[in-house]
Amino acid sequence: MNDIKLAVIGGDIRMIYCAKKLAECGFEVSFCGFDCAAPDCGDAVRCRTVKDAVKGAAAVILPVPYSHDGCRINAPFSCTDIRIDEALDAVTPTQLVLAGVCPPGFIEKAEARLLSVIDYMKDEELVVKNAIPTAEGALELAMKELPVTVHGTKTLVSGYGRVGKAVSAAFSALHSSVTVCARHADALAWAKATGYYTADMKEICRAVRDKDVIINTVPAPVLDNNVLSFVRPDTLIIDLASVPGGVDFEAAERLGLKAIHALSLPGKVAPKTAGKNIADAVISVMRKKGVI
């Protein structure tokens, strides 16, 4: 793969681990957007500009999330802003663009330039792998914020998808009594078969009353003002769902509840693992697209 060049543009430290992993796999890798940091980048080559980095690359890899404001590439270690338009203008239609969490507006901008964009965060293998550090991060938060041990607590997990399953297993492993709250009968059946207490989402007001920890994984309004009014004042609420989340944070504040929106936990808890997982997903996507 030494004749295939890849470019990594911006991102947090996990994107450096991604670049290193890709270089270790035999790709020629260039990256930019880390001029305010001096990370160990292995065999990846640091470039000063986006134009230099993407020149000759078969694929251009943007971070997750690709942007926080829709105007600039997410590049916290860059001394200057990397505008999205600047990055896309440097890419040619023959180059594949891979980015994490791509909204319609970004895809429209790319398609207007005849660019092909793939959201690697939709890769099923990556989503499953990310569930593990997300669950560990939620556990770490609970240990830090609770005045008691996780052992012996009562935890409610809202949603029983990939993250919900991992979170339930992590808290149960420390002997927290876990209740899974979900909408679908099959999810509740699997949760019950695994050994957890269960509650239909219609019963969430009752289910939250006696919990020490409530963890939401559903990216839709679940813990609204009405539900939160049934939550104990000393309950810790952790929202793992992507923006805008499933918790009414304004209502939580009014009610004096501690609610934390814990975003991007894989990158915070285990950046090396998260970066390698992204690299694996990128390689998988490129294989499917015939780039390699």
Image (cartoon, rainbow, N blue to C red):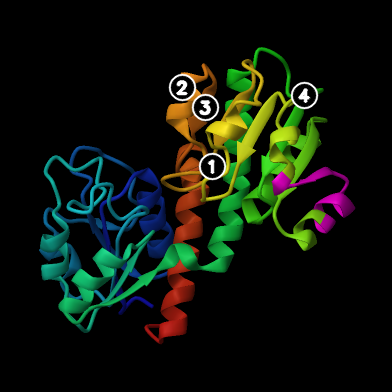
Q: Disc 1 or 3, which lies upstream in sequence?
A: 1
The residue depicted at 15 percent of the width and 77 percent of the height is 113
Badge 4 element: loop
Give the spatial CA distance, label 1 vs label 2. Answer: 18 Å
| Amino acid beneath label 4 | Thr
Residue that mark 1 sits on: 240
Does any portion of residue 25 appear in the rendered image?
Answer: no
Residue that mark 2 sits on: 253
| Amino acid beneath label 3 | Ala
The residue depicted at 57 percent of the width and 49 percent of the height is 218
| Amino acid beneath label 2 | Glu
Badge 2 element: helix
Q: Nearer the viewer, mark 2 or mark 3?
A: 2
Residue that mark 4 sits on: 153
Badge 1 element: loop
Answer whether residue 190 is magenta in the image.
Answer: yes
Range of magenta residues: 189-202
- Based on the displayed image, in which of its 4 quarters is residue 175 positioned? top right
Which quadrant, please, contains the N terminus? bottom left
Extreme-front residue of the structure: 226
